[in-house]
Amino acid sequence: MIEQPYVYRHTELVEPDWQRLPGWADVSPRDWASAQWQRAHCVKNIRQLRQVVGDGLDERFYADLERDQAERATMSMLVPPQMVNTMVPHLSPAHPGFTDAFYADPVRRYMIPVFTDRREDWPSHPLASRDSLHEAEMWAVEGLTHRYPTKVLAELLPTCPQYCGHCTRMDLVGNPTPVVDKHKFALAREDRLTAMLGYLRNNPGVRDVVVSGGDVANMPWPRLESFVAGLLEIENIRDIRLASKALMGLPQFWLTDEVRAGMERLAKVARERDVSIAIHTHVNTAQSVTPLVAAAAKAMLDTGIRDVRNQGVLLRGTNDKTEQLLDLCFALLDDAKIMPYYFYMCDMIPGSEHWRLSLAEAQKLQHDIMGYLPGFATPRFICDVPYVGKRWVHQVARYDRELGISYWTKNYRTAVESGDELALQREYEYYDPIHLLPEAGQEYWRSRVATPVAVG
Ligand code: SF4
């Protein structure tokens, strides 16, 4: 037997016992399986978290959470019971080590961030920004980002069934927090959706639409189905991807009769028209892949859609170890039939420095997972470079590790560069977290911040 850095073992998926949580001790399997019950019992505030875990968490945790919500959080709290139940899945809150285990839990670390998680020295990178990918600047019509030559992102709605602490669309998605007011769409939803379909009809160069938000699981099903049916009528659209973290966070939604029947209708038309429909979900940890998640993914594949794929986000403390990533990929692949597809580096939004990895760390993780998974299921690690788009982490043109600045090039123009002669010659910058830099690099950033004119 050859010793390897990672040892594969097939692990049976397990639905953690929600009745270990005092607030849900009497919840029946029937209620748990109900999307309506799940939505009605989401944890939205500290009081509700207390009701669920009883006396299981020390007061220091609640104080830490309260301070984060008041001073740092860019997303309000919204965690479906399905996701709460995957935190510390093997421990009852009555266990004396529950608070420490909850602090350390990889799902808790990004869904319920607390003040002491964040960096005190650099909570935010000085060049972090709302809408760090400049999606709104590239809206062809409101909510429709046309960044790449052949594909667009349609932000149908600004809400999700769950709010992730690191959400890259923190500018738009979710409720306002004490530190972030949210952008509001100016147009009514019907007008936006109609304008999006009109734009796509008039732009035959676009063949691929990511239908997103937010999360499409928050769209009333009949409206989502009619929008996708509208896309299927457009001759040039060949790929449709529905973005829903809820396939993991609220699998009960994707298992409802209404949604299954609707997806069957869409898949049938798509097959007749040779169009591919896929669901793209967002799973960051192996413990999130439970039998209900697997059932939802397989139910969707059974409708006849092309694929269910995963786009995770690399987050320190959640999935920054090779073993965690491979465990996740195998959990997705073996029993849930979800294709590992991408792992994004966390974007440069305010308050994200404690989550972000350096480019060098992401490159090493990409290197270290190679060879274990089938090639078709080996995810690519992606840096989403502002004004450039997605680049594999090894496609960097130059990398100054002392200053933590990577330089990237591009091979197409976005709408904002239509008249820019040098767009394809220019190098575009991306930045490592400052706390990881050698002292000389940290000093460089301290002096840049001290001289604001030099920043940005
Ligand atoms: S599900 Fe996606 S859009 Fe919604 S909060 Fe999480 S990362 Fe943001």
Image (spheres, rainbow, N blue to C red):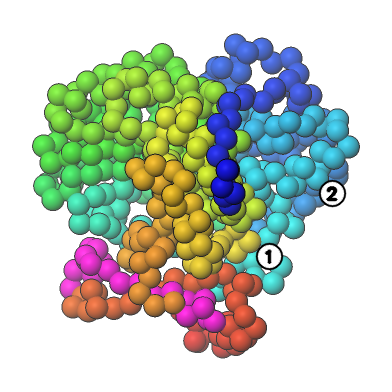
Residue 63 located left or right of residue 274: right
In the rendered view, would you say 148 is above or below 28?
A: below
Instruction: Examine the structure image and report whether residue 431 is included in the region drawn in magenta.
Output: no
- Give the class, few, some or many, for how many residues have Cα within 10 Å of label 2's Cα (few <14, many ≥20): few
Residue positioned 68% across, 65% down in the render? 119
Q: Which residues are magenta?
A: 400-419
Picture quarter with the N terminus:
top right
Picture coordinates of residue 197, whole percent (x, y): 20, 40
Q: Amino acid at mark 1?
A: Arg
Q: Which residue is mark 1?
A: 119
State the residue in front, 339 or 30. Answer: 339
In the rendered view, would you say 21 is above or below 115?
A: above
Q: Which residue is mark 2?
A: 60
Residue 88 located left or right of residue 38: right
Picture coordinates of residue 18, whole percent (x, y): 69, 23
Picture coordinates of residue 116, whole percent (x, y): 74, 58
Q: Quadrant of residue 80?
A: top right
Can residue 357 be seen here? The reply is yes
Residue positioned 60% across, 11% down in the render? 30
Q: Main secondary structure of the magenta part?
A: loop
In the rendered view, would you say 367 is above or below 24?
A: below
Q: Residues at badges 1 and 2 in contact (C-beta under 8 Å)?
A: no
Label 2: which secondary element: helix
State the residue in front, 49 or 9. Answer: 9
Q: Amino acid at mark 2?
A: Arg
For residue 330, which numbered disc appears in the image? none
Q: Quadrant of residue 408?
A: bottom left
Picture coordinates of residue 157, whole percent (x, y): 40, 40
Determine if the C-beta at disc 2 is less than 8 A from ligand 1.
no
State the separation of the CA atoms marked 1 and 2: 18 Å
